[in-house]
Amino acid sequence: MRICAYVQEAYAKQTYKNECMDTRQFVGLRVVLDALEKDGYDVEYAGIATVHEYDVVLVSITAFCDWWTFLGERIRWKEGSYKVFVGGAGVLHVTPFLPWVDAFMIGRGEDIIVPLIRAEERGDRFESESVIYSDDFSEDRCYYIKQARESYPHPIQLHKGAPWKEGQIGCNHRCLFCSYTWSRKQNFSGAFMWDGGGTLDMSERECALLDYKSGKYNVNWKMLRTTAIDGSSQRLRYGVGKKIDDSVVMDFVRDATSSDASPHIVRLFNIVGYPTERVEDYAELVDTFRRADEKCTGTSNGKKWVFGLQNNHFIPYPATPMACAPFSCKDYRNSMILGLKSELPKRRLYSGKCVDLVEGQLEEGLSTVLLNVIVARAGRNDWDSIEKVALSKKFWSSKDAVKCSTLAKYFDLSTLCGAYAPEELPSRYLHTYAEVEKLWGNTPLEVEYRNVRC
Ligand code: SF4
């Protein structure tokens, strides 16, 4: 049996400078290939020109955006007798992609791939609650995201550099919106240290504010470049289970300024577009920085620390407690500057004596986020529209606003972006290691959202 790993011509994440088969996005695929090779299988690489020559095509979807570039090629593949098996962190809700995939591996693939391929060789099926065959899939069955108790034990040789060895799996926190933590059961104790996927040592460059708050993480201020607040106000952060008080943000800012490190830029990842979010939440964040700055006594060299907000749009990911939450179909570019009517130069929201707070550019335009919502929630009625969008060169070369109006024409966005009842949630069949479905529709911000609307 000839098996290939598919290499897309176009990669979805153009913003990654070094996007290639060596970057961490493809480590999951390498683990799966390693498991196959250890079992004696040969796996070749194939692209759109040769893919039809194989019996099994393995496809890695590492993020929701990869679906669109993959489909743009998959629909143009030559006919063949191949079976298409898809896995990766971007494989959660499968209904939108049933026509183009034979089997989906949900979650960790290293223990699934060999029995799946063996069953295929026998002309049989591998019965697993984490394998979805398209032709007998039902939204009314239950499927589970496959977990791994142990990190993958074998080193993987990426093309460049030292062999990669998997570190910790999961996160020691459970933020209600976070697909990462709910898809991967934590296999360690203590604070998470991202190993950079073998390409970068990030352990001193980023910290979780929850670990900083609990004293589990000693910040090296000279090295620190990134942290996340994931909510502009204490109300929002508590509402999504990320219990960072304003006082913790203030302590963090003051500790930075009073350290002996030279002032530098620290990126603050934030989420905007939560249900019930309002401009007062942005004002609270600015006020928190103002209050912290007022208590600062100076910095190591008299220059200012700059905290750059990196805002990302809230998306109700499948198999998270907030999977049923409404999506705010609004363009959040400059939302804080405009909402707060800030007239400070250089995108500043606050400029004090020791600290500046800046609203960075949004990483993704509204159309990109809407495409993710479609991946998270589309149904069988959307197959034609998905195919049209995936194949349309005109769509992909359009500006964000044109893309948004095209998506509004092809998809029922008011339903896809709305709040869902759990029994109507398109991804209701998808479960994980914890009973997140018990919270569907009932997380604090969703309850508040319903009360406000009533
Ligand atoms: S968002 Fe929360 S749960 Fe997710 S990785 Fe960050 S700290 Fe962990």
Image (cartoon, helix red, strand yellow):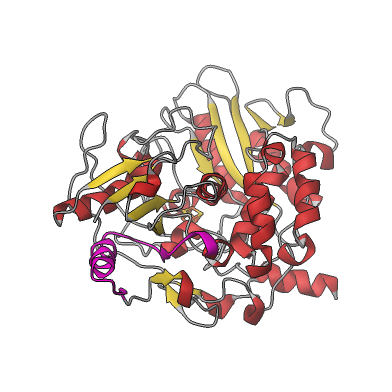
* Magenta-colored stretch includes residue 270: no
Q: Quadrant of the C terminus?
A: bottom right
Residue 270 versus residue 20 in the image, above or below: below
Q: Which of 151 and 133 lies nearest the eye of the viewer?
A: 133
Residue 44 locus on image (x, y percent)? 27, 43
Q: Residue at x 64, y 68 (%)?
A: 379
Q: Which of 208 and 35 lies nearest the eye of the viewer?
A: 35
* Magenta-colored stretch includes residue 103: yes
Residue 153 seen in render = yes
Residue 322 locus on image (x, y percent)? 60, 67
Q: Quadrant of the N terminus?
A: bottom left
Q: Locate residue 189 relative to residue 141 in the image: left or right.
A: left
Residue 191 seen in render = no
Task: Give the quarter of the image for residue 354.
Answer: top right
Report the number of discs.
0
Q: Residue at x 46, y 30 (%)?
A: 259
Residue 93 versus residue 309 in the image, above or below: below
Q: Residue at x 62, y 38 (%)?
A: 363
Q: Residue at x 77, y 46 (%)?
A: 404
Q: Which of 321 and 114 lies nearest the eye of the viewer?
A: 114
Residue 372 locus on image (x, y percent)? 62, 53
Task: Give the quarter of the image for residue 39.
Answer: bottom left
Residue 53 versus residue 223 in the image, above or below: below
Magenta highlight range: 99-126
Residue 190 locus on image (x, y percent)? 32, 56
Q: Locate residue 133 relative to residue 227 in the image: left or right.
A: left
Task: Give the quarter of the image for residue 278.
Answer: bottom right
Residue 394 versus residue 281 in the image, above or below: above
